[in-house]
Amino acid sequence: TVKNEFLDYDAHFDFLKKLMSKEEYEQFFNSYEDLHQEAGNHVFEREEKSLKDYLGEVKGNQFSEDFELFRSTIQMEKYAPIHEQENIEKLYEDIVKFYSQITK
């Protein structure tokens, strides 16, 4: 059974943008992880595949590899001692780029 046909990424993107503008970085990363978990659950409910497998099959290996690299980058930034706004803005752009394509 499918709970939701669509995941409201825009609401997540808006919230992340608000946290970024307020420089609330810890909450930004926590909210990103919520988005990632929700996206993975959504894909699993609809496709019965992990997010990684789904991306490899549907979006291709290059997209999947780029996404994994992005996931590594966001984890490194999450634990960086100092966050620069410019880096967070780039991560935000990548979040929108990747997650807006996940269920399309």
Image (tube, grey):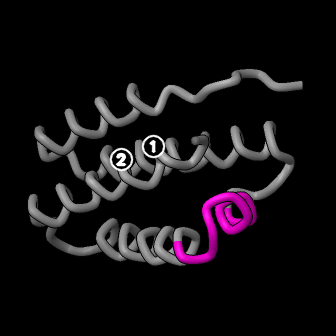
Q: Going 31% across and 31% down the picture, which residue do you hit?
A: 15
- The answer to which of 65 and 41 lies nearer the viewer is 65
Q: Going 80% across and 38% down the picture, which residue do you hit?
A: 45
Q: Is residue 13 magenta?
A: no
The residue singled out by tag 2 in the image is: 96
Residue 94 locus on image (x, y percent): 33, 58
Q: Going 12% across and 39% down the picture, which residue do you hit?
A: 22
Q: In the drawing, what numbered circle is on residue 100?
A: 1
Answer few, some or many: residues within 10 Å of disc 1's Cα (few below 14, many 20 plus, some between 14 and 19). some
Distance from label 1 to label 2 (Cα)?
A: 6 Å
| Image quadrant in which the N terminus is located | top right
Q: Is residue 104 left or right of residue 48?
A: left
Counting the numbered discs, the total is 2
- The answer to which of 19 and 102 lies nearer the viewer is 102
Is the residue 18 above or below the residue 39 in the image? above
Answer few, some or many: residues within 10 Å of disc 2's Cα (few below 14, many 20 plus, some between 14 and 19). some
Residue 83 locus on image (x, y percent): 16, 65
Q: Are marks 1 and 2 in contact (CB under 8 Å)?
A: yes
Is the residue 17 above or below the residue 74 in the image? above
Quadrant of the image occupied by residue 3: top right
Q: Is residue 75 left or right of residue 18?
A: right
Residue 68 locus on image (x, y percent): 52, 73
| Image quadrant in which the C terminus is located | top right
- The answer to which of 19 and 89 lies nearer the viewer is 89
The magenta stretch is 52-62
Residue 24 locus on image (x, y percent): 20, 44
- The answer to which of 28 and 49 lies nearer the viewer is 49
Is the residue 92 above or below the residue 81 in the image? above
The type of residue carrying mark 1 is Ser
Q: Residue furthest right?
A: 1
Q: Going 58% across and 29% down the picture, which residue do you hit?
A: 7
Q: Is residue 14 left or right of residue 100?
A: left
